[in-house]
Image (cartoon, coloured by chain):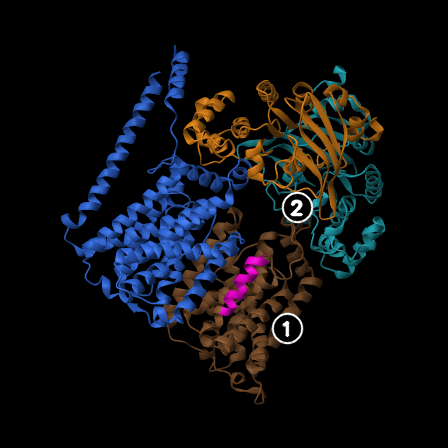
Chain colours: A cyan, B brown, C blue, D orange
Amino acid sequence: MSMLEVKDIEVYYGDFQAINKVSINVDKGDVVSLIGANGAGKSTLINAICGINKTRAGSVTFLGKDITKEKTSHIVSLGLTSAPEGSHCFEKMTIQDNLLMGAYLCKSSAERKQRLEEIYELFPMLREKAKQLATFLSGGQRQMLSIGRALMTQPKLLICDEISLGLAPVVIKEIYSQIEKITQKGVTLLIIDQDVSRSLFHSKYAYVMLEGKIVMEGKSSDMNIDEVNDAYFGINFSKKE
Amino acid sequence: MLQYLVQGILLGGLYAIIGIGMSLVFGIMRLTNLAHGDLMILSSYTALTFCELLGGNLILAAILTIITMIIVGFFIQGFLLNNILDKGSEPALLVTFGVSVFLANLLHKIFSADYRGLANSLSNTKVISTPAVSISAMYLFSFLVAILLITGLHLVMQYTNFGRSIRATSDNAMAASLTGVNTKKTYIYAMMLSMGVTAVSGVLIGCTYTFNASVGSSYLIIAFGVVVIGGMGSLVGTLVGGIVLGVAQLLGSYFFGSGVQMLVAYVVLLIVLATRPNGLFARGARK
Amino acid sequence: MKNTTQHLSARKFKKVGKYSALAIILILLATLPLLNNSAYLVSLVTLIMIYMALGQMWNLLGGYAGLLSLGMQAFIGIGGYSLAVLSVDYGMNIFVAVLIGGALSVLFGLAVSPALFKMTGVYFAIGTWVIAEALMIFFSNWSVVKYAKGIMIKTVYHLSGTQIYYIAVVLGIASVLIVFLIMRSKTGLSLMAMRDNPGAAEAMGVKIFSTKLKCYMIACFITGIAGGVMYINLANITPSASISTQWTIAMTFMVIIGGIGTMEGPIIGSVIYVLLTQYLYNFPGSAMIILGAIAVIAIMIMPNGIMGTIHNKTGFEILSPRRTLSPSIKDILRGSASDTNR
Amino acid sequence: MNEILNVKEIGISFGSNEVLKSVNFTLYENEVLGIIGPNGAGKTVLLNILCGILSPHKGSIVFEGKSISKQKIAERCRMGFGRTFQVPRPFEKMTVLENIMVGSVFGGGLSEKLAKEKAEEIAAFIGLEDKLLWFAGKLGLLERKRLEIGRALATAPKVLLLDEVGGGLTESEVGSIIDLVKKLKTSGLSIIWIEHIIRTMLEGTDRVLLVANGTDVICGPPTEVMSSRAVREVYMGNEGA
């Protein structure tokens, strides 16, 4: 069953077209990855889906509802959110407050506490630093906090933006191992990563973006890494070698 | 000397309340509300009007004033500022300047230039009356209200869902919206909160001093001074800022005469502005 | 080829039209008191000219240099009091007194600039304002300026309305000319660049700080002189009226309505402001209320002001700071245009 | 070849986030040095350090044998650093001619008259001569990128810093940017070029430097670097290598 359906959307910054007729589809329970180089338009696409960037054409449907023109806060309440890259933590708030913000829409304080416990179990490091300000976290810890905060909204579909951005390989491995646990809880995932082979390995379906367009898509297991490389960089450079 | 010092500290409490409203708005939307002083005087006049209508029931009048100002805050943010904040900080700043001119002159037209005051029993009562120190109950009351307000707001900001959403929005509006916060609405709530506090400061000022339509701008400078000295957006800092200004003003009055007391306060403010533009207590500001 | 020449001749025609329009305006201004013996009109244009000078200076700071000042009234006070004290108490010639007022304004500006230029944005705005308020309190307690009760400037009583008119016209035109010349100079190039993108300007070698300071000094000087001329016209000065936020309100209003960051903005703004306040004079007490409301509405619907909006839509400018192409490249372009047409 | 710029052990952190740990490289006269690295590796930060917008917390920058660590932005520009911005920042309400003149007057130190002639020359060089009197705000993206290069050239740089001048352009437009950079090289400039479009790096540079995890990983001829194990590891993840 299709959970998120993006159809032919176009996004402009002024006169500059950042996203050109992009369509993607995410099925319930899947892990889908979106691959592309810096500047390919991945984050712009995510922000358009979440209602942060305005779309000029096309439609976004989530769980059968048209959310193209909806406010971000409403989209989150429907069960779709994104974990932005780690630099978007609430710097001047404690880790615990950052996480509790994720449960903003939850009115019961008992349930907020329960959700908090779940996140702490997933990322024990966050419990250790619960009373520290987010500004003192390292890059990998920020990434975990961002994902944890997004999970606090209890999303049906979670988008993880730039999940390995600037992180050391060990940390990336740790984050991906948590990602698996998250999917086991029944959360559908759309993962953005520059790390091609890793995202292919962890996902069921993949899209490759280049210069605002989807240039390649398919089942991750069927994808040939060299072909992805070519699509990723927009050249035939594997053949050149 | 001791008299001036104590009175300065207590006056600082009153100044802190004036500053809180401005600090809230600045903290969350990085906007300096140039109409802040006039909005405060608007609440003084509102309280005066309610008081006259209710036959002198100041407490009820104060409550009605707070409600009125909260509604005013809703309109100012919802209909004016929310529509202009996207266009950059300068247009929004100038809108508040326009509102300031509009309000000051509207009040002048309605209430004339005569100085008015809110009659109350506290301002004539002395809590301490010794040869060295004599303290008016009104000053002490204002100071206690300031402490109560600051503590209350601090608790709300730190420990409630609502307070967290305000802090989160001021920290990173985009990330806040991704947790389900409607940022435009949060701005409205913040302005309503700010106006509620401003109403309190307006009533207290009306009880402590006489006022007319043109004094709003000097209270704006005080509010700004309090916020700058205490550090923009910091609640506890506001109290310190208020006390620094209050003491500077009254010691100025002690040493140089009451005519130049504000001059001393302004000079202190200028020194802080030039040397520690992020406030005395700003932890190494980012960026 | 045809298109290009037509385009060029249309341009030339426009240019001639523009210059003749400017010449007509200047002649009209010079002969107005002779043509028309209505003292009212003369006094109206006098006010417009003084306000124009104030608006130009505020715009130079707020519109180009990125220095939003709410405290230029300090210099109006310094200018006005220089005239009053020097001419009344020391018997100085009023014109010399006004010029000294300008010089004192620069000195005061220099004295506060080390502190002021540590502040940015809204801090700068409020900092200038606090300085002005502090100066006002100081003047109210200073014997040399007769405390708060002010000074009757008897030395200007003998001047006729026409004489004051010419003084004001010289001031108004000079202020426009000065801004125009600045804009056509190297400094103007850096100012426009700073207005559009300070970061990029700095990366291209523009010295932001010294350019700002230069502008501030110029604005102090002219505002001080305009203050002197204002009080030649008003003839009675007090601290609270001369160092008053009313002036800042006027300057801000003119520039916002006319178009911030354009040379024509303050000119149009000053005409609108003076006419509007004169008209609203009939509704005592309501003038500033309406002015405030107009300002708020104008910013909401037209943040670039009248000239800014027109310019964004059409590229139209009366006083153009634009650089023209050098003849050699014009020839080359014309050559290549005709090549392609053939 | 003579050294023109030597960067040693440059490091910078934002809060606790150590973006650059220790970066070392040398730029030779009349050389095009490409810098690649994953998103967030700190390439633009490095450029901002070189032109004085950010000051590094450690390390030294030696330009023509002299340390320039203390010089401010405008001073460095006058010494011979020209740069472009990733997102073009034209002076929108000024004409193309005036935009370039700002560079030649203040960065190049020319009189207005000479500056104008130089600006016209540069406009012809970057192919904007027929739009000299256009307001820069009316230009399209490619033209803005060209103007960005033109303005940097007008400051008479010895070292030109290009920040993703090819980003967001179409295939053929990228080709024309590569040609432009080649033309610049023949005029004797030394160029540092950040780009994520690998094709530009292969075709347009003499050497390529890979920056990842806050350090310089590998530096050498473009084809050698591109086919190196290090690049595959950084971009494709460990599994891909």
Q: Quadrant of residue D83?
A: top right
The residue at the point 48 percent across, 21 percent down is: D124
Q: Chain of mark 1?
A: B
Task: Give the structural element (helix, strand or loop) at label 2.
Answer: helix
The local crowd at label 1, few if under 14, some if 14 to 19, many if 20 or more residues have their Cα within 10 Å, is some
Marks 2 and 1 on same chain: no
Q: Nearer the viewer, mark 2 or mark 1?
A: 1
At mark 1, the secondary structure is: helix
Dot 2: within a 10 Å radius of its alpha carbon, few (fewer than 14), some, or many (20 or more) residues? Answer: many
Alpha carbon distance from label 2 to label 1: 40 Å
**Image-quadrant location for residue D4:** top right
Q: Residue at x 17, y 50 (%)?
A: C33
Label ID, residue A75: 2
Residue range corresponding to the magenta coloring: B264-277
Magenta residues, dominant SS class: helix
Q: Is B273 covered by the magenta stretch?
A: yes
Q: Where's residue C171, x and y in %? A: 29, 50
Question: What residue does disc 1 label?
Answer: B147
* Horizontal arrangement in the rendering, residue D182 relative to residue C177 (left or right): right
Residue B82: image x %, image y %? 53, 52
Given residues C156 and A116, the one toward you in this image is C156
Q: How many marks?
A: 2
Q: Left of A41 or right of it: where is B136?
A: left
Q: Amino acid at mark 1?
A: Ile
Q: Chain of mark 2?
A: A
